[in-house]
């Protein structure tokens, strides 16, 4: 079973930057799709960015050009999200996600709060 631990959330003013990190336990981990999702109060959880095992990336339209997702060095059990030019609408709880390749099962981190003040 894979465990995901996030860090790096916090409070920042609009236009500022934050970097989120997620570390996956190595037990049972096989390099595969990892991503970041977010959920604002009263809204559904939505994809922010994802990165495949091969390094291909995908972003929500609302964050393109401002956010960048990346993986750590081998064995690539970490994924980070660099968030620049943050906006109040980016305020949400951000969740790390890992999809197990054999079963398609989604693992989730505990979430980290990002608050952007105007």
Image: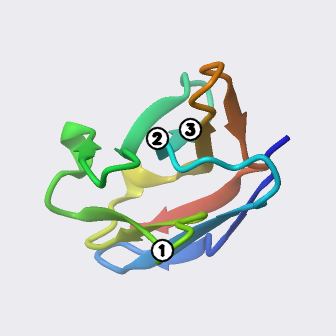
**Residue 63 left/right relative to 40:** left
Compared to 57, does 100 lie above or below? above
Sort mark 2 into few (<14), some (14-19) or many (20+) by Cα contacts within 10 Å. Answer: many
Quadrant location, the C terminus? bottom left
**Residue 117 left/right relative to 112:** left
- Tell me residue 45's x, y (percent): 55, 28
Instruction: Report the Cα–Cα distance between label 1 and label 3.
Output: 27 Å
* Disc ID at residue 72: 1
Compared to 82, does 88 lie above or below? above
Sort mark 3 into few (<14), some (14-19) or many (20+) by Cα contacts within 10 Å. Answer: some
Q: Nearer the viewer, residue 75 or 91?
A: 75
Sort mark 1 into few (<14), some (14-19) or many (20+) by Cα contacts within 10 Å. Answer: few
Q: Residue at x 50, y 43 (%)?
A: 32
Q: Nearer the viewer, residue 109 or 93?
A: 109
* Nearest to N terminus: mark 2 or mark 3: 2
Quadrant location, the N terminus? top right
Provide the secondary structure element on which disc 2 rests: loop
* Nearest to N terminus: mark 1 or mark 2: 2
Provide the secondary structure element on which disc 3 rests: loop
Instruction: Report the Cα–Cα distance between label 2 and label 3.
Output: 23 Å
- Tell me residue 10's x, y (percent): 62, 73
Residue 27 image-quadrant placement: bottom right
Q: Residue at x 60, y 42 (%)?
A: 97
**Which tag is nearer the camera, tag 1 or tag 3?**
1
* Disc ID at residue 40: 3
**Residue 57 left/right relative to 34:** left
**Residue 51 left/right relative to 59:** right
Residue 42 image-quadrant placement: top right
Q: Residue at x 60, y 21 (%)?
A: 104
Q: Which residue is mark 2?
A: 33
């Amino acid at each position: 079973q894979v465990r995901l631990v996030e860090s790096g959330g916090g409070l920042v003013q609009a236009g500022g930057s934050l970097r989120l990190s997620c570390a996956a336990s190595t037990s049972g981990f096989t390099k595969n799709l990892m991503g970041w999702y977010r959920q604002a109060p009263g809204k559904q959880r939505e994809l922010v960015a994802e990165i495949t095992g091969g390094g291909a990336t995908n972003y929500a339209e609302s964050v393109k050009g401002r956010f960048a997702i990346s993986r750590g060095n081998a064995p690539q059990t970490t994924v980070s999200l660099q968030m620049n030019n943050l906006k109040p609408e980016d305020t949400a709880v951000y969740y790390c996600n890992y999809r197990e390749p054999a079963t398609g099962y989604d693992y989730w981190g505990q979430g980290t709060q990002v608050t952007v003040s105007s």
